[in-house]
Amino acid sequence: MQIFIATVLSHVPAWVWAILAFIALMGWLQSRDQQPSRARVLILPLLWAGFGAWGIQNAFGSTLMPWLAWAAGLLLGAGLIIHSGWPGLAGFNPSRQRFFVPGSWLPLALMLGIFVGKFALGMSLALHAELAGSTGFAVGFSSLFGLLGGAFLGRSRNILRCATIE
């Protein structure tokens, strides 16, 4: 088993490890209090939603069910985070036009979830290409990417809302 894992991991392109290092850095930065601009609050969720959509398109094409599952996951993830109020201590400074976002390790967990999901999807399809035609497989991964991407959208909505209530 160890030889199989070592063989598989040795065939992973270097850029995948660079992405993982970037995610680790971004997650570490998110663990610290920040004062981002409105644009920066919007960039992360749009990138992750786009990354999830790109993964679905590459793996399953334009087949309807994966896209419906992704959209449902996106709505559910956003709704859960909006309902939770996370990040609860966020605020807005109108004179500086900056938000206050308390540090949290949850963004790292979400980003790693997307990365691991994309990695598992790619490895699964590389080893068993026929899985791309499995509706359950497609719906499962698409829902996961939607749920995690939606969590970022919900978080950004909660942060941006601080500017309208202060």
Image (cartoon, grey):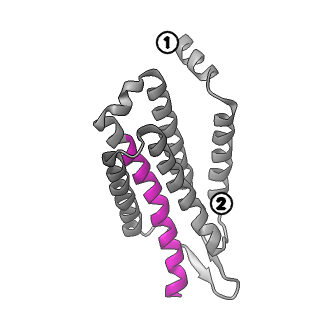
128, 6: nearer the viewer: 128
Q: Is residue 95 left or right of residue 130?
A: right
Asked if residue 131 is positioned above or below residue 56 in the image, the reply reads above
Q: Residue 148 location in percent, x, y?
A: 45, 52
Q: Is residue 130 visible?
A: yes
Secondary structure category for the residue under label 1: loop
SS category of the residue bearing label 2: loop
Q: Which mark is residue 34?
A: none
Q: Magenta segment, which residues?
A: 141-166
Q: At x 53% / y 50%, what residue is drawn?
A: 51
Whole-percent x, y for residue 107 in the image? 54, 55
Q: Residues within 10 Å of mark 2 (few under 14, many from 20)?
A: few
Quadrant in the rendering for residue 40: bottom right
Give, as a three-letter code, the residue at label 2: Arg
Q: Is residue 123 above or below residue 151?
A: above
* 157 lies left or right of 147: right
Residue neighbourhood size for the residue with mark 1, other residues' Cα within 10 Å, grouped as few (<14), some (14–19), many (≥20): few
Q: Is residue 102 visible?
A: no
Of badges 1 and 2, the one in the foreground is: 1
**Dominant SS type (magenta):** helix
- Residue highlighted by disc 2: 32
Disc sitting over residue 1 in the figure: 1
Within the magenta stretch, is there residue 41?
no
Report if residue 142 lies within the magenta region: yes
Q: Are marks 1 and 2 in contact (CB under 8 Å)?
A: no
Give percent across and percent down for residue 100: 62, 74
The three-letter code of the residue at mark 1 reads: Met
Q: Is residue 118 placed above or below 92 in the rendered structure?
A: above
Distance CA(mark 1)–CA(mark 2): 39 Å
